[in-house]
Image (tube, rainbow, N blue to C red):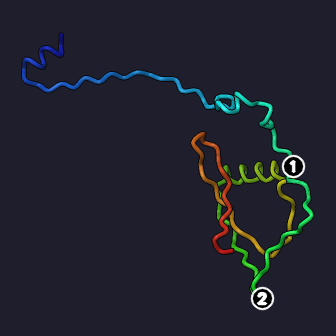
Amino acid sequence: IKARKYVENGCELFLAQVTGTVSKEKQVEDVLVIRDFPEVFLEDLPGLPPHRQVEFCIDLIPGATPVARAPYRLAPSKLKELSEQLKELSENGFIRPSSSPWGAPVLFVKKKDCSFRMCIDYREL
């Protein structure tokens, strides 16, 4: 009724309809392939693959000096995240302590689910 009065007075009106949708977080089980073949997908990754008969190595340029960049400064929340991710990777056997003279800094990128993805900046290497 009020809108009619505004229209009669020559005013422009805009009608907007807002609907609320509840979006649940996507789960692994929501992926069709995983739902159809659950026996193929593991709950946790088992660790590093077994040792192979062929040993791989990276040949360095003679006389190359090791590159070791200083770590990027991180906020306390990201330092905590770094510690947690390194601990998990170490416990699963994906990484191990190293005393290599080579080094690259770490940074974090926020994922869609607001968690952090650890990225290593290998550009200098």
Q: Residue furthest bottom?
A: 63
For this view, does 116 lie left or right of residue 63? left
Q: Nearer the viewer, residue 77 or 43?
A: 43
Residue visible at 82% across and 51% down in the picture: 87
Q: What's under tag 1, amino acid-wise?
A: Glu
Residue visible at 14% across and 27% down in the picture: 12
Q: Are marks 1 and 2 in contact (CB under 8 Å)?
A: no
Q: CA distance from mark 1 to mark 2?
A: 36 Å
Q: Badge 1: few (under 14), some or many (20 or more) residues near its Cα, within 10 Å?
A: few
For this view, does 20 lie left or right of residue 106? left
Say what secondary structure mark 1 lies in. Answer: helix
For this view, does 82 lie left or right of residue 31? right
Residue visible at 54% across and 27% down in the picture: 23
Q: What's under tag 2, amino acid-wise?
A: Pro
Q: In front: mark 1 or mark 2?
A: 2
- Dot 1 corresponds to which residue? 91
- Dot 2 corresponds to which residue? 62
Q: Nearer the viewer, residue 87 or 32?
A: 32
Q: Is residue 36 above or below residue 107?
A: above
In the drawing, what numbered circle is on residue 50?
none
- Which image quarter holds the N terminus? top left
